[in-house]
Structures are given as C-alpha cells and as structure tokens.
Image (cartoon, rainbow, N blue to C red):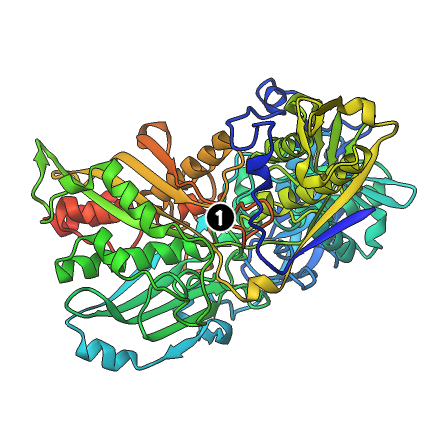
Amino acid sequence: MTETRTMDRPDRRNILDEAAQGVIGTPMDRPEGKLKVSGTATYAHEYNLPGTAFGVLVRATVPSGRLAHVNETSVADIEGILGVYSDERFLRNPAQGGANEAPVQGTDIDYFGQAVALVVAETFEAARDGATRIQLRLDADDDGVFDPASSPPEAQPDEAVDQGDLSAAMADAAHSIDVTYTTPGHNSAAMEPHCSVAEWQDGNLILRGSYQMLKYNRNEIADAIGIDPAKVRILSPYVGGGFGSKLGIAPEAVAAAIAAKALNRPVCVALTRQQVFENVMRRSESKQRVRLAADKDGKLSGLGHEAWVSNLPEESFAEPVLQATHFLYGGDSRKLDLYLHRVNRICAGSVRAPGEAIGMQILENAMDELAHEAGIDPVELRIRNIPDMHPEKDIPYTSRKMEEALRTGAEAFGWDKRPAKPATRREGEWLVGMGMATAARINMLQASEARVTLKADGTAIVETDMTDIGTGTYSILTQIAAEMLGLPSERVTTILGDTDLPPAAGSGGSWGAASSGSSVFVACEEIRERIAERLDCKPDELTLKDGQAICGNRSTPLADLLDSDICVEGRIESGKLSQKVQSATYGAHFAEVAVNAVTGETRVRRMLGVFGCGRILNEKTARSQCIGGMTWGMGIALHEDLMFDLRDGHLTNRDLAEYHVPVNLDVPQQDVIFIDERDGESSPIQAKGIGELGICGAAAAITNAIFNATGVRVRDYPATLDKIIAEMA
C-alpha cells in the first residue's frame, strides 16, 4: 500500500525528537563509506560488462551550423573500429533535469565543441584515435553570436517586480548606492566525469551512469531515443559529485544507447575532462546592477536589482539571479528585472545554488558598500533590514534564523575586532581585513516516494530511486528509518539509485534530504501504527527502542510482533502550505583575509559559517556540505572563470589545469555552527535543504574582507591579484 501525505498544514509534532533511538542528528558514519574509501563502490565507468565496447564523442569545430557528412572511411584502417554513429536523436545540449520540455536534438550545431558523432571500438584507445582522425563536413553559419553584449536582451517577465517608486526613493535617500558588478561563468567540474554504459536486453534499455534525478532522467532518455519509459531502467547507486551537471542526461547517454542498439552489445561512453567542460551545463556569466536607498539609520526604502545572463537560442533556462533578492531584505520601493542574452556558447543551466550563488554574492557586496557609505556596522545594517513579512507577496516566513545566525557568527568570529576603517591593519607586507555576508537559499519540498519494509527478523530495508551525490543520502535515510522503527542503524539497509524502485525527488535544489526523508518518515509512521495496533496501543503511546516495542509497562521484542514483513510505500507531496508562506534557509559567512601590499595576492586566513536550516539529520554530512560550499565560495571569489574566445565562442580553459579551483593550500581553517531549528512548515521531519546554502554569499564575505583590508572594491570577479594591485597602486 502507499501512504500519502500532502503538506497542506504545518507539522509540529516533533516525532523525531520524541523517538528514543537517538540516531537522528548524530554524526553517524556513511554506511557505504568503507566501500568508497576501499575502491569497491561501483561507479559508472567501473561496470565491466562482458563484451563492452568503448565510444568516444567527436566535437564540432564550428560554433554554429550543421553536420552535413561523416566520412566513416577515414577511420576504417584503425584496428578495432566497430562503427561511427551520428543521428538525429543525438543531444545537441544536455537535458536540464526535471524541466517540462523535450531535450534539444538534431544535427544542427549550436556551439564550438558540441558532440556531433560517436566513434566506437573494441578499446578506448582505438575509439579515441578514431575520434581524433574522423573527417567531418560541417556547414558553418556566419551569424553566430559569441559576446552576450552584442545580443539583444530578452526580458524575463516572471522575475520582474516594479513596486513603488525606486527613482524617488533614491533621490530622497539619506544614503544610496548604485553599483554594477560582473561575474564570469562557472563549471561544476565534479570529481567523477560523466559516463554512461548502455545495454539492451529484450528490447529494454539498461543504462548505468552518473545521474542525479532518475525519475526525470528515465523520461528524458526514453523521449530522446523514442521508446516507452517503462522500457528503461537506470542504475546510478554511486555518483562522484554532480552540483547540477548531472541533473539531466548528457550527450554521452543517448549516443551510448544508440550505438549499443546497433551493435547489440554494451557500449561505454565516458567524457574526457575537456568534454565535461564543453558538454555539460555551465553557470552563466552575469552583469548585475544593484541600487539601494536607505534613511539615516540604514533602513532600506528602495531596492533595485537588475541582472543580465545568457543561454543558447533554444534553451528557456535563465539563471534566477534575483531569487533571494525577492524576499531577503525590505524596502517598499522595489524594481527587479532579469534579462537573457542569446549566444552560441555552451548550454547554461543549474550549477550549485543556481541564482543565489551569484545573486546573493552581488547583493551582499552592495549591502557592504551601503554599510560603508552610511557608517553602519555591516552586521547591524542587515539586521535592521530583516522584513517582518515577504516584501512583495505579503505572506509570512516559516522559521527564520537569520538574525540569530548573524549575531552568533559575529560573536564567535570576533567581529568586534574588525577595523571600521579600511586598510588600517598591517602585518609586514600583509594588509589584513574582515568581511561578512548573509547566506540565504530558497527551500522547496518535492514529491518523493520510498518503500520501507520491516522484516519479520527485526531488520528493515529502505528502497527508493533517490541518489547520493556525496550528500549523505545513504546515511540520512538509514537514520530516519532506524529512529522511527527503534532499530540500531546497522539493522537498516538502504538501497538507492535504481528506477525499478519508488520514484524519489532526486538530488537537486537542496530538496533531496527533506523530500526523500519525509517519504521514508511517512512510510515508517504507518508501520508504527500497525505495530501499535498489535499491542492494542495508541500510536502516540508507543516507544520503539533497541528492537523493543514498549507500551505502558509492557516491553515486547519487535520480532515477536512480526509474523510476516510489513511493507509500506510512503509518498510526500508539496501542498497548499507552500503558497501561503515563504520557506528558506538562512545563515551568515565571516572571513578574514590577508592581501599582500606588494603583489596583491589574497590569502583567506579563516572562515566561519553559521547556518539555520531546520533539523540537522546528520551532523557530519551536513557540516561537510557547508564546508564544501564555503570552499567553492573561495573559488568564486578568487579563482574560477570560464574564458570564451569572442571570435568563435570556444572555451579556452576547458580543463583543471587552466580552470582554477581552490586547492589544499588555498583553504584555511573553516568552522561551521548550526543554529538549532525545527521548521514544521517545511516538511514533516522539520528539516530543510542544506546542500547549497553554504555557497550562497560566501564569495561576498571574502571580497568584502578584501575591501576592509585594502580599501579596494573588485567589481569584476574573480578578485585576482592583477585587479587588486591595479587599484592599490
């Protein structure tokens, strides 16, 4: 049976707090951890199926046009070549994952480096040789657009807000700023490159790969190759990082499926690191203008935020830069606008914390500029501008720990020691400063299902097609089931990443743990009710602990109550409540940097993140997510920059040698503090998303610290030493 719960009203029962097993919130080790560190967890490229052939994708060398002809005879002399494939069904761009639109397919070329053909051979080396030597005839167009500034912007009306009179507010303000910042594109660059192993059995496709959202990926691949989704099974038990790049299927999945069908044998297609940079989604570059108007006390009267981003001509996704700006701060007069430029560059899509990662970054830079202009402490300025109600929709917030995070962080970091005047603290050649920023990320509950089986021997199995992309899903779902059923965690087995299992929300948007965890919770709650019936006990009087069922003065071994397995499928759905409240996670970043007065080099000395994100389900995995986000914030602030040649739109730094990310010596001591929070309006388990919160605002804290250290504002990210030293001279 399926037990369904719709979130139409708050759930403040605190059942997980009242449960007696005591595993929720603890830093329990990952159940699959030993498999991963010993190299025995099977990732996509490690399926050694009998008879597997290997394919390598061929890239377009023109930025716009059509594939006219593939000369297969040009590789016929390579030993082991099995076939060369190009097909109208090939993906031109990666699917967005969950979007209600068909993947873009065909032989048209949209950008330099696009996958246009596949060479398959007995060995990877032969296929790679063939992909290098294959001769293509490409009909190039002359109308490619490579510079966003040369493309007319398309307004995105769903993001537009025009409330009050911002111009008048700016004119009448005691303090105001009007600043423009730019951010470059980013790549997810997950540790595990994309890979798909396709196999056909009796007309059914089995796809082993690295994907984040299997229930959507199944439909995407079925739609692309033209079969019933019921004939597709996807296996993705282990994913070596995604950050949005594996939300949807990428070109290698479709190419592998087509070739495997033609050859009647498994085909493995893995992307090289360079192909990952070219064939998966990038974060769009942006130009952002922020206008802030405030009275003499720093209270905002006006807020303007305009952003310009880009994407391919046929893609509807526009980086939602304004997402947090809509609800984070007050200001009666508001003007928000988002514009999309059409360019022949790599497809833009969701990269960790789409929207807030760069929108919060610039908004928090602007708030720091206003604080300096008004002579108000940056922490205090933010606290003064926390609205009581959503400033645009006039709806209440759910539990919101923003002020507590700001004050807790300021005290723990020693914010009172920050020099109010920039460029006044010096240690030899090094100028030292502190900066801070608010963190915020929207919170969403998505439809999700899980099957929980309490077996007659007193063990339990959790099954769902939910994925674990390094976020700790195996741990969290195990802990929820163990807590609810009163079992030691080692007596619970969690099985993930198989579309034959109940469809989960998937790993994306920071909704995975709360959504899939709630479906497990719902199933377990029904199991508890059945156990209570067998004890002639009310469910709220039942205690399950250490394999014992306790009611009143009776304690009965759980196994004695089970003459057969109890199997329940739980389903959670977002309901009417989501339209009545604003749900988000909040926090604060604090950073101390040292900037070399001679070279302009920046070194981050320490960082602190304080976060309020609902119930913490596993302290260890939650902390890891926050540290990862903060580290990425360092990359955004100081290193990361997708560089495109404006002559033909090709990406010039398409590997980790040239696309710079933080390494060990760049990353200082990082501390994380969690604010105790239960949000009964967000989910039945009172948890909220955490995977993306740590990146939101982190870069701004670092560049605000650079200003405090040097007096230099770098408004063109990243803040590399050449930009800093030029302003210091």
Quick check: 36 above or below 328?
A: above
Can residue 692 be seen here? The reply is yes
Give percent across and percent down for residue 110.
58, 61
Toward the right, the furthest residue is 202
> Which residue does the image show at 38% across and 67% down from the upper left?
307
Quick check: 72 above or below 319?
A: above
In the shown orientation, is residue 160 left or right of residue 6?
left
Toward the top, the furthest residue is 38
Give percent across and percent down for residue 102.
70, 62
Image quadrant in which you'd find residue 133: top right
Give percent across and percent down for residue 287.
35, 63
In the shown orientation, is residue 646 left or right of residue 349?
left
Q: Helix, strand, or loop for circle 1?
A: loop
Give percent across and percent down for residue 687.
53, 45
Label 1 crowd (10 A; few <14 / some 14-19 / many >=20): many
Viewer-side residue, 26 vs 636: 26
Residue on which disc 1 sits = 352
Viewer-side residue, 103 vs 624: 624
